[in-house]
């Protein structure tokens, strides 16, 4: 994953742009980690912005199928069975609790 410092900078720039334009934004795949979720909620509060979290649910088998298809189309060397299973494990252990916290809000 991209370092949080870089991700936070990109998020900040995007949020400032849409705020100046009085527009909305859709951010895909963020936040994934607790530190990112805390940062995101703090920035939304500071900017007095509302947000909605959308979660698409699919099975582990379907996720693996999509990753394999992407790996074949893009010839990505980092997309192998071990890496794919690790990504799913990280999602289950780190991202799912964040999604559960957002549900409670």
Image: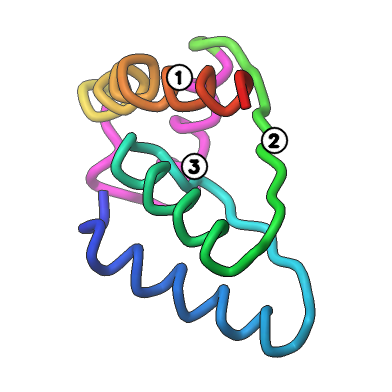
Distance (Cα) linking label 3 and label 1? 23 Å
In the foreground, 40 or 27: 40
Distance (Cα) linking label 2 and label 3? 22 Å
Instruction: Identify the mark nearer the N-term, 3 or 1.
Output: 3
Residue 42 sits in quarter:
bottom left
Instruction: Where is residue 105? Give x, y as percent.
Output: 62, 27
Magenta stretch, residue numbers: 62-80
Colour scheme in use:
rainbow
- Residue 78 relative to residue 102: left or right: left
Callout 1: helix, strand or loop? helix
Q: Which residue is mark 2?
A: 54
Instruction: Identify the mark nearer the N-term, 1 or 2.
Output: 2
58 in magenta: no
Residue at (56, 58) in percent of width and height: 44
Is the residue 78 above or below the residue 91 in the image? below
Residue at (49, 49) in percent of width and height: 41
Marks 3 and 2: in contact by CB < 8 Å?
no
Instruction: Where is residue 52? Give x, y as percent.
Output: 71, 43
Is the residue 70 above or below the residue 8 in the image? above
Q: Return the mark for residue 96.
A: 1
Residue at (21, 58) in percent of width and height: 3
Marks 2 and 1: in contact by CB < 8 Å?
no
Marks 1 and 3: in contact by CB < 8 Å?
no
Q: Which residue is mark 3?
A: 70
66 in magenta: yes
Instruction: Count the numbered circles shown.
Output: 3
């Amino acid at each position: 994953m991209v370092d949080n410092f870089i991700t936070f900078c990109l998020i900040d720039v995007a949020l400032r742009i849409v705020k100046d334009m009085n527009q909305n934004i859709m951010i895909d795949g963020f936040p994934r980690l607790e530190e990112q979720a805390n940062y995101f909620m703090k920035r939304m509060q500071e900017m007095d912005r509302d947000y909605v979290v959308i979660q698409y649910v699919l099975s582990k088998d379907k996720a693996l199928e999509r990753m394999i298809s992407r790996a074949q189309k893009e010839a990505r060397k980092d997309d192998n069975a071990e890496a794919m299973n690790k990504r799913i494990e990280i999602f289950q252990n780190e991202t799912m609790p964040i999604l559960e916290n957002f549900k409670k809000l």
